Amino acid sequence: MNLMQYVEEQLITKSKHPDFKGGDTVTVHYKIKEGEKERVQMFTGVVLQRRGHGPVESFTVRKMSNGVGVERIFPVNSPYIEKIDIKKKGVVRRARIFYLRELTGKKARIQEKIQVAEVAPTA
């Protein structure tokens, strides 16, 4: 086994998060330390990409704040991520949707994947 892989597996704690991909709208609950105080900040936006694999995987989330696009990169296995909520599953044809950066208004919307509920047969 490679020495770097061994160190990564020993030091990085793996977190259990739901499966999400590019195009999904997520809320990341992120712990922030300010002096001695600690608080949880929520960052809601569209996942542009997931990059890397294993312990060094990260994902990029983009949101619009007062008409300005804000992007933030989160490591998947960060101890500061409290939880990740999936708000919407998006339908996109690409894994990395950087074309969203140039779009504004209604053009920047992503279609939502419709969940079909199973209906139990009646006798």
Image: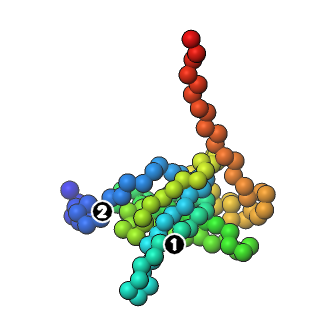
| Identity of the residue furthest to the bottom in this view | 35
Disc 1 or disc 2, which is closer to the eye?
A: 1
Residue at left 57%, top 28%?
Answer: 118
Residue at left 47%, top 72%?
Answer: 40
Q: Is residue 64 at all visible to an observer of this figure?
A: yes
Q: Secondary structure at mark 1?
A: strand
Q: Is residue 33 above or below residue 121?
A: below
Residue 41 bears which disc, if any? 1
| Identity of the residue furthest to the top in this view | 123
Residue with the mark numbered 2: 13
Location of the C terminus (image quadrant): top right
| Quarter location, residue 122 | top right
Q: Amino acid at mark 2?
A: Thr
| Residue 34, x across and y down, in percent | 44, 85
Q: Is residue 80 above or below residue 91?
A: below
| Residue 98, x across and y down, in percent | 64, 61
Q: Amino acid at mark 1?
A: Gln
